[in-house]
Amino acid sequence: MFDNLTERLGQTLKNISGKGRLTEDNIKDTMREVRMALLEADVALPVVREFVAKVKEQALGEEVGKSLNPGQVFIKIVQKQLESVMGEANEALNLAATPPAVVLMAGLQGAGKTTTVAKLAKFLIEREKKKVLTVSADVYRPAAIKQLETLSAEVNAEFFPSTVEQKPRDIVNAAMEHAKKSFIDVVLVDTAGRLAVDADMMQEIKDLHAAINPVETLFVVDSMTGQDAANTAKAFDEALPLTGVVLTKTDGDARGGAALSVRQITGKPIKFLGIGEKNDALEPFHPERVASRILGMGDVLSLIEEVERKVDKDKAAKLAKKVQKGKGFDLQDFKEQLEQMRNMGGMMSLMDKLPGMGGMTDKIKEQAGDKQFTQMEAIINSMTPGERQRPDIIKGSRKKRIAAGSGTQIQDVNRLLKQFTQMQKMMKKMSGGGMKKMMRNMQGMMPPGGPGGMFPPR
């Protein structure tokens, strides 16, 4: 997300950050570039106008002129304004109600509403330790009811059955009764989507809202629709008292216009981002962290939280002990590191959160892409346990067999073995205190040597 915007803004701000003095002229030129970058990212025009006006006003203020490094102060102003546009700080779900707290999900068809219900259920169960019930009031699509039942089972949420013959209001009232008897903390209600905003749909969801009086009414919208996402959210907000927005499919959105438009156009906070297809691919929206990512400064806080949550600390500690004892680092250990990284969303997801990675060239990104890791795993999977423990025995005929078994070429096997040899050397250097330090810092988050060590020039 934001790839295009990061690239454009990065170059523009780099030009001004080296200036010893900010003048009205160079601020004007820079703001013209910033304006174009935002418009190309499909940010709504009123939002762009206000953003540019506020940055310009602050940049021409006395504080910047007196600063020893006016270029850096200017970047800080841009960052603060980005945060302001997106909402300053994360706004968590307000579940402070007599249980069960009801969360109503609204949105157009195809926005990812049903999958978002399951992701939110998993989030509440695992991170908030809540007992969650899901229910579908989408009586127009039998498949939606079945889909929610399947997804709920996957995330260990209780599912309340419903049929297309029932009325949405009756379904939800029955679910509420069941929730009270079963000591459920949160009820997530999936509603029917339409291809466009229409009067019948709005009336139905208004009636449903009035019947259950939810503590949160979240509008789920596809971020790839850009500023249209903000306009659709506004139309819904006029019919329903929305409390927040969930932006889905942000992993496929290189522009980010929706994230920068929604708050200002609707006045409602973005509460979550859908960042992939997996059930755990939902993260709270932190404007200050997203602003940092847009400006290529990374998002280390989110990265640390992800490592804490997803890295198998026992495996990381075992590897550290093994290498300390001089037993070496083998291809099985390497494979486990790759698996841990995939659990965290893959190499590109990690790189997006690391400072300074925003300006990587496409070639480096391609080399560090997740396809490389999938290929490496396939090659290691085609090896026998003995070959994984002692890669030095892998010669001609074994290489042919491994390449055929993994659907790769012999040169791919050779490349992996060469990279692995470099890693082994590095691991030897890191044994003892150095290894401890590295494991503490990396916590098994990526294979030893980091992205640079893994992708030497071909």
Image (spheres, grey):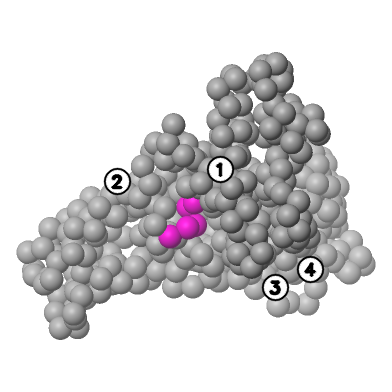
Q: Which one is earlier in the sequence, the residue at label 4 or at label 1?
A: 4
Task: Residue 110 in the image: state x and y as whole percent.
Answer: 58, 39
Label drawn at residue 95: 3
Q: Quadrant of residue 184?
A: bottom right
The residue lying at 56 percent from left, 38 percent from top is 419
Q: Which one is earlier in the sequence, the residue at label 3 or at label 2?
A: 2
Instruction: Look at the numbered discs 1 and 3 and tell me whether their residues touch, using CB distance below 8 Å.
Output: no
Using the numbered discs, state the Cα–Cα distance from disc 4 to disc 3 in whole angstroms.
Answer: 12 Å
Residue highlighted by disc 4: 129
Q: Nearer the viewer, mark 4 or mark 3?
A: 4
Using the numbered discs, state the Cα–Cα distance from disc 3 to disc 2 in whole angstroms.
Answer: 38 Å
The residue lying at 51 percent from left, 46 percent from top is 453
Q: Is residue 391 above or below residue 117?
A: above
Q: Nearer the viewer, mark 1 or mark 2?
A: 1
Residue highlighted by disc 1: 422
Instruction: Look at the numbered discs 2 and 4 and tell me whether their residues touch, using CB distance below 8 Å.
Output: no
Q: Which one is earlier in the sequence, the residue at label 1 or at label 3?
A: 3
Tell me if 363 is positioned left or right of 183 in this view: left
Is residue 92 found inside the magenta-colored segment of the image?
A: no
Q: In the structure shown, which secondary structural element does the residue marked by tag 4 occupy?
A: loop
Q: Find the magenta span and give its range.
A: 351-355
Q: Amino acid at mark 3?
A: Leu
Q: Dot 2 surroundings within 10 Å: few (below 14), some, or many (20 or more)?
A: some
